Amino acid sequence: MSAEPGKAAHEHAVLLNAIADGANEYPKPEHVNYTYGTAGFRTLATKLPSVLFRVALLAVLRSKRLEGATIGVMVTASHNPEPDNGVKLVDPSGEMLDPNWENHATALANCPTTESLISTFTTLVTHLRVDLHQPASIVYARDTRPSGPDLIQALEAGFKAFGASVKIVDVGVTTTPILHYVVKATNDKSGSYGKPTVEGYMEKTATAFKTLIGSKGPLAPLYVDCANGVGANALTEITKHIGDIIPIHPINTATTTPGALNSQCGADFVKTKQALPPSVQSAGYLSKPGTRGCSYDGDADRIVYYYLHETKGTFRLLDGDKIAVMVAMFFGDLVAKAKLEGDNKLKVGVVQTAYANGSSTKYLTSRNIPVTCVSTGVKHLHHAAQRYDIGVYFEANGHGTVLFSPQALQTLRDAQPTSPDSANAIKHLLAFSDLINQAVGDAVSDMLLVEAVLAHKGWRASDWDAGYEDLPNRLVKVEVPDRSIFVATDAERKLVHPVGLQAEIDKAMAKVEMGRSFVRPSGTEDCVRVYAEANSQVEAETLAKTVVDLVEQSSQMS
């Protein structure tokens, strides 16, 4: 029932006055244009207070539009440098914000005045048919960045404008994937997904891991570079539950040291530099043969593995491609052992982006694992993975997860095993579905996924690495005055603008053996990224340099 007309008008006026007060307290900076991109809003933290206030307004509208379903808000800038920060919304199922609402976020963030903000807000309420008398529910969290508390204060000011109609839960300082988990669990009214708390996440993850490892533990020691970020906190908590199964040695855990976050460490550093973090290198943690390490990023939604070659001592990277290939092949084997026939047979598929190494794609397709290529961005990968019964997606940077469709889970729960092997395979598939954070890429649960697969196969890192050899590659970040002039198509593998640039890139690729290169504007920074791969490292470096030069020339001419 709607409120009485007079009372409703009064409540609406109170709301608009509260929004005006907040907008005056957190005015939009001049000459700044915000875009809700792949990772939400992300820029220098000093430019974000007005955005946080306005994101709060949209989060509440989203929840009210969905009749009180819980919406998540995460304040983080992931792998970006410490002075940056960001904010993104999480939909009720734990997925990214509905793309149709991204434009609404951008519109609110860019309103230049208090009057325009109130006008845009009122228009959105009407356009989206939001009943402001509906309840709303929000859960929010932040990473360890020093700018976090002030930004949370601006966010909370936006929530408070709505008064008692909004229920808010502050999850505190935690990882992005745990916030996604809490949102998904809160909206799962059956209670079967897990308790909607950080501790609920730890309990569910640890229980599944223990089921999968069984009598195979204790496992080999693992060194974990936490990027001096919030993953260090999560790792400490999960270790309380599983430390007797796998000895975990945290590295780079200085979450309160100014400037330490993501500095010379973390998944992005390792993937981009193709080298150990200096802190890991100098300490000699991986010098013992068979020892492996991994790196999280600043908000712990990415992970890459690595080890040192046992005879040469050279650095070997096991990135998102390597994780996807091993996991997909392993799940394919488990599905075969489950002996599910006819309509119950499950299909395993992999989703990649243009950044995936060509050798990984070839390895999968040659073994009859279907591969779909989509544009960069979790939302594209996630939705494509949902088309498979078991969809494996990992970006090369280490962000990824595995999705089990509802039908696949029901099939596994209803399955009648035909042998002890079949029963074990079904049991393990269900345990993996609990271990994996199916809302989003998650460094902690993905780490345990990798460790469980390695334990089942009896592999060391070198065995995992032996499946295929990456084509040598190079990823370069090129700062440009205006990234928007670079427009890509064909899952971001081809440029349509600037006109003529793609033809020049094609010529450069043709000059090197097995050459492949593409250019795409970053979704999070004022730059474009150039990827190149070829038959040798020298050729990959040469191709990358040529394409970088072409990009810089085009940027100067535009």
Image: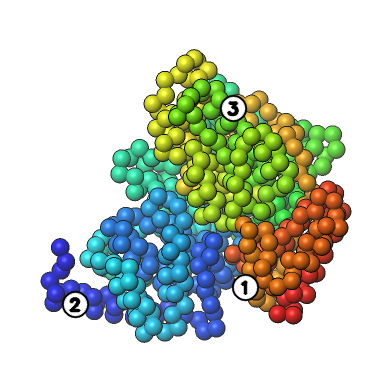
Q: Secondary structure at mark 1?
A: helix
Disc number for residue 333: 3
Q: Secondary structure at mark 2?
A: helix
The 10 Å Cα crowd at callout 1, few under 14, some 14 to 19, many 20 or more, is some
Q: Secondary structure at mark 3?
A: helix
Q: Earlier in the sequence, mark 2 or mark 3?
A: 2
Nearest the eye: 517 or 104: 517
Nearest the eye: 196 or 264: 196
Q: CA distance from mark 1 to mark 3?
A: 44 Å
Residue 65 percent coordinates (x, y) = 31, 62
Q: CA distance from mark 2 to mark 3?
A: 63 Å
Q: Earlier in the sequence, mark 1 or mark 3?
A: 3
Q: Residue at x 22, y 66 (%)?
A: 133
Residue 16 percent coordinates (x, y) = 29, 78
Q: Which residue is mark 1?
A: 484
Residue 80 percent coordinates (x, y) = 61, 62
Q: Which residue is mark 2?
A: 9
Q: Residue at x 74, y 75 (%)?
A: 554
Nearest the eye: 517 or 398: 517
Dividing the picture into quarters, in which one does residue 249 lie?
top right
The 10 Å Cα crowd at callout 2, few under 14, some 14 to 19, many 20 or more, is few
Q: CA distance from mark 2 to mark 1?
A: 43 Å
